[in-house]
Structures are given as structure tokens and as C-alpha cells.
Amino acid sequence: MKIHKEGYKVILVTLFILMALVLLVMWLIPNPYVRYFLYAGFIIHLLWTMRFFRYPEREVNEGDAYILSSADGKIVALEETYEGEYFKEKRLLISVFMSPYDVHINWYPFSGVVKYVQYHPGLYLVAYHPKSSEENERNSIVLEKEEGKDVLIRQVAGIMARKIVNYAEVNAEAHQGAEFGIIRFGSRVDFYLPLNVDVKVKMHEKVRARRTVIAEFK
């Protein structure tokens, strides 16, 4: 299993903490059954942490008009709304909620140029809360394919997510399916699309990053 580079330090720290806990259990708990139960819990926690940072080998579902999902998860919002950070106009919002069991790496939905990158500190409401997109810690990226074909992609931290990692840089070329960041431990990705796109998903649908077409440019 391939591990994302952002997971190396977390996994190493987790391993050292669990080793210390094993020594503590050996010293303080004489009952072997209780010790084995705790050891099993430690192993499960380590394996879950490693699985969280897995980097799936996945072929990109390439298409010139395709807007791919940037994240694994479930569609939790599909509505017209006012986008006030960059476009300052009505946009079509599609939101993908990532549970702690989903892959949390984020990939570019289409090829283009990065026009805007902005980090915002904030709260840690549950990521599926309607206000999380505006009040939680978040990072916004605007990706432009050509004039009139641009999307704001917002990485949103959740109640468990305490770190947003973003690699996007203004004026950089972006390639469909290339990685642009990761959010740790439960989060959400919002897409603010032009109103005239052809939507390809529905509410509560499960989507896969680099594979699922959430909309198409017209």
C-alpha cells in the first residue's frame, strides 16, 4: 500500500506513542487478557492511521469537457448559491463530504491555470454542516480552463480535520487528475461551478476522485 508523504510523520509519531503505551501496559497491567485486548486496539489504530494516508493508484477519467470530482466521498449539497469570495455572483454549488474512511487526497478536476489561492482560518464545525463552507478553516482555489469556464474549489476542514495542505500556486499550470492537496481526518470539498454546466451527479451519490464526472462544461 502506497502512503502519502504527509502521512510519514503522523504514522511515525503514532508508532512511537503506541510503543510507549505497550511498555506502560506491560508494566501496569498484570492481566494478560486485558493486555492482549489493549494491544489489539493499538494495532487497529496504527493500521487505521496508515490506511487513512493511503495513496490509491487510479487511472484518470480524462475528458476535455469533464469536471471530475477532486475527492472521494458523498454529494451533500447540489444547489444554486451566491459565491461571495471571488466571483461575487450566483454559482452552482456541488459539495463532497469525505468521511474518515475515505481517501483525503485532492486532485485537480480539469486542466487549466490557477488564478487564485487563499487560505482562511476558521472554526471546526462538522464538515457536512451548511455553514462549514463559510465559517470553518478552508482554502480556496480558482481554476480557469478558458474565459467563462472557471471553478472555485474550496477545501474545508471538519470537526476532526485540523490541517489543510495545499500545493496550488497562482499562475501555475494544472493538469486534470494531478494532486493539489490533502485534508486530514474528515472534511469537505466544495465546487462553485458556472450555472450553465451539465450536472452529472445527484444528492447522496458516492463519488470517486479522478474518476467520477460531477459536471461537464458546455
Image (tube, grey):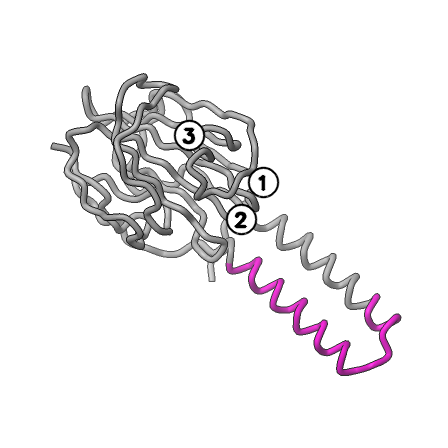
Q: Quadrant of residue 19?
A: bottom right
Per the model, the C-alpha gap separating discs 3 and 1 is 19 Å
Per the model, the C-alpha gap separating discs 1 and 2 is 7 Å
Q: Which mark is residue 162?
A: 1
Residue 50 within the segment the image draws in magenta: yes
Of the numbered discs 3 and 2, the one sitting upstream in the chain is 3
Q: Position of residue 25 (x, y in %)?
A: 82, 70
Per the model, the C-alpha gap separating discs 3 and 2 is 20 Å
Of the numbered discs 1 and 2, the one sitting upstream in the chain is 1
Name above or below for residue 104 compared with residue 20: above
Q: Residue at x 36, y 19 (%)?
A: 84
Q: Which mark is in front, 3 or 2?
A: 2
Question: Which residue is at the front of the view, 121 or 50?
Answer: 121
Do residues under tags 1 and 2 come within 8 Å of each other at their CB atoms? yes
Position of 15 with respect to 207 (left or right) is: right
Residue 166 within the segment the image draws in magenta: no
Q: Which residue is mark 2?
A: 185
Q: Residue at x 17, y 38 (%)?
A: 216
Q: Quadrant of residue 154?
A: top left
Q: Which mark is residue 168?
A: 3
Name above or below for residue 163 compared with residue 56: above
Report the predominant secondary structure element of the magenta stretch: helix
Q: Quadrant of residue 21?
A: bottom right
Q: Three-letter amino acid code at disc 1? A: Arg
Circle 1 Cα neighbour tier, 10 Å, few/some/many (<14 / 14–19 / ≥20): some
Q: Secondary structure at mark 2?
A: loop
The number of numbered badges drawn on the structure is 3
The magenta region covers 24-51
Do residues under tags 3 and 2 come within 8 Å of each other at their CB atoms? no
Q: Which mark is in front, 3 or 1?
A: 1
